[in-house]
Image (tube, rainbow, N blue to C red):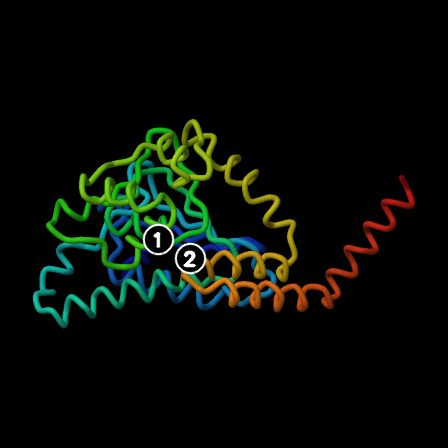
């Protein structure tokens, strides 16, 4: 019998759900998980009907832990370590480059590589009692997959250094205050409804409006110069303005005005 996939991939209309499904192992980001994550995003990301991606972990203890330590024991040389870093970074860049918003749903802790996956996403919804921890230092290493720069961009260099150098497990309410979380949900039972309410306005947007907003904000995260970010804004504006979705929205607006 074939071993079940470590990543559940579920498409529900405009939503793509990706669930790391190894709760008995703390949902480690093995190469199999990372490969499946990238393949799923590449398969669905450019479908014009897609509006949102949800990334979560099975169970209620961990969103995702780091790389599979047993799997990585053979990585000993500089070249092997660089290759492993490149592979993980390539996967998380697929998350960072997704043309629609990606939401991390933390029903459990995000630690190590799991925290890097969480901050690669655009939004983080956390259950009360969960944590984000850049605890790589406990294994005498640093972040590997681009998560360090993402973290510093989100919370600032001082708090990022505090988290990494102290291996802090940052609780949900603190993450919310720091801008590391976008919403804190009281318990697991409330999470599905909270996620649905959070993404409802996203699902109501046109694809052109979403990709324009996403690309502008991602350009800032990539460190693109101001002039180039303005060019990105204008390019997406022109595309959206001439699209039939825009003119359909204008007609609906005019109809409502006439009926007011």
Q: Say which of 247 and 186 sits in front.
A: 247
Where residue 9 appears, as percent x and y from the top left, is 43, 56
Label 1 belongs to which residue?
150
Q: CA distance from mark 2 to mark 1?
A: 8 Å
Q: From the viewer's side, name the closer residue of 114 and 49.
A: 114
Q: Percent x, y for residue 181? A: 41, 39
In this rendering, position of residue 88 left or right of residue 251: left
Number of numbered discs: 2
Instruction: Choose top left, top right, bottom left or bottom right for residue 34.
Output: bottom left
Q: What is the crowding at mark 1: few (fewer than 14 residues within 10 Å), some, or many (at least 20)?
A: many
Q: Are marks 2 and 1 in contact (CB under 8 Å)?
A: yes
Q: Which residue is mark 2?
A: 221
Specify the farthest residue to the bottom: 79
Counting from the top left corner in percent of width and height, residue 52 is at 53, 53
Q: Quadrant of residue 156?
A: top left
**Numbered tag placed on residue 215 in the rendering:** none
> Of marks 2 and 1, which one's residue comes earlier in the chain?
1
Residue 195 % position (x, y): 50, 40
Q: Is residue 107 above or below residue 203?
A: above
Q: Quadrant of the C terminus?
A: top right
The N terminus is located in which quarter?
bottom left
Please name the residue shown 41% across and 50% down the image: 55
Q: Dot 2, crowdedness within 10 Å: few (<14), some or many (≥20)? A: some
């Amino acid at each position: 019998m074939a071993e079940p996939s470590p990543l559940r991939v579920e498409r529900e209309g405009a939503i793509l759900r990706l669930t790391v499904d190894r709760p008995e192992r703390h949902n480690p980001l093995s190469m199999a998980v990372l490969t499946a994550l990238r393949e799923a995003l590449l398969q669905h990301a450019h479908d014009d009907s897609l509006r949102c991606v949800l990334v979560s972990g099975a169970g209620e203890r961990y969103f995702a832990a780091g790389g599979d330590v047993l799997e990585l024991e053979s990585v000993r040389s500089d070249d092997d370590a660089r290759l492993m870093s490149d592979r993980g970074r390539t996967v998380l860049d697929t998350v960072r480059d997704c043309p629609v918003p990606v939401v991390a749903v933390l029903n459990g802790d995000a630690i190590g590589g799991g925290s890097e996956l969480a901050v690669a996403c655009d939004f983080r919804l956390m259950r009360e009692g969960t944590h984000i921890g850049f605890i790589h230092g406990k294994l005498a290493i640093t972040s590997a997959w681009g998560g360090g720069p993402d973290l510093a961009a989100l919370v600032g260099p001082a708090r990022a250094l505090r988290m990494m150098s102290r291996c802090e497990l940052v609780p949900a309410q603190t993450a919310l205050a720091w801008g590391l979380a976008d919403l804190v949900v009281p318990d697991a039972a409330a999470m599905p409804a909270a996620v649905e309410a959070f993404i409802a306005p996203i699902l109501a947007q046109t694809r052109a409006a979403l990709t324009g907003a996403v690309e502008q904000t991602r350009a800032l995260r990539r460190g693109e110069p101001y002039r180039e970010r303005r060019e990105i804004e204008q390019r997406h504006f022109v595309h959206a303005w001439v699209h039939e979705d825009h003119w359909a929205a204008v007609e609906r607006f005019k109809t409502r005005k006439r009926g007011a």
